[in-house]
Image: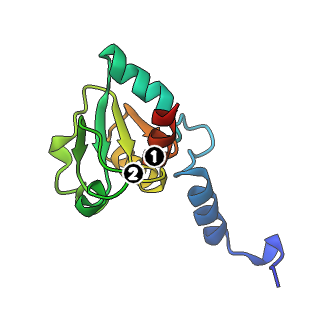
Amino acid sequence: MIPKPWQVPATVIAVMVAWAGGGCAPQVGETPRYDLKPVITASEYLSRVESGTAPFLLDVREPEELQGPLGALASAHNIPLGQISERMEEIPRDREVVVVCRSGSRSHSAIQWLQSQGYTRLRNLEGGMLAIREAGKK
């Protein structure tokens, strides 16, 4: 049975909203510090690579995934999601950073954490390496 809205504690609702919306919502009258869902499509990323204007690419997959069927992009800097806090100094703050994983979920989590650490020029590669593989077939 699903509880009525007035039966759900406010903290539970706040967590659900933050999870569904991709982060913490600003308080009333507060200006948001960053856009929570900036994305770049696989085809847009690949065309930027071809034109020589590729952003820094952060791949947050585990090392063994790079050897799997989706492979790895040559320009990617691999820092698994669980190691980002220890290796943050490897991620530039002065340029655009595109974050990629298999499908876009872990990269979204990485972006949320990096934003909480003050990073602002972050984009999620929409659909992850699955989308890169599909875009490369066209």
Residue 51: x, y in percent?
35, 14
Q: Nearer the viewer, residue 117 or 43?
A: 43
Q: Residue flagged by tag 2: what amino acid is it?
A: Cys
Furthest-bottom residue in this view = 1
User: Which residue appears at 56% of the width and 44% of the height?
Assistant: 26
Q: Nearer the viewer, residue 5 or 94?
A: 94
Quadrant position of the N terminus in the picture: bottom right
Residue 40: x, y in percent?
49, 32
User: Which residue appears at 23% of the width and 56% of the height?
Assistant: 85
Q: Secondary structure at mark 1?
A: helix
Q: Are marks 2 and 1 in contact (CB under 8 Å)?
A: yes
Question: Relative to 126, is 10 on the left or the right?
Answer: right
Residue 18: x, y in percent?
57, 57
Q: Secondary structure at mark 2?
A: loop
Residue occupied by mark 1: 128
Dot placed on the residue nearer the N-terminal end, 2 or 1: 2
Q: Quadrant of residue 89?
A: top left
Question: Relative to 67, is 28 on the left or the right?
Answer: right
User: Which residue appears at 52% of the width and 36% of the height?
Assistant: 32
Q: Nearer the viewer, residue 80 or 115?
A: 80
Residue occupied by mark 2: 101
Q: Residue flagged by tag 1: what amino acid is it?
A: Gly
Residue 77: x, y in percent?
22, 42
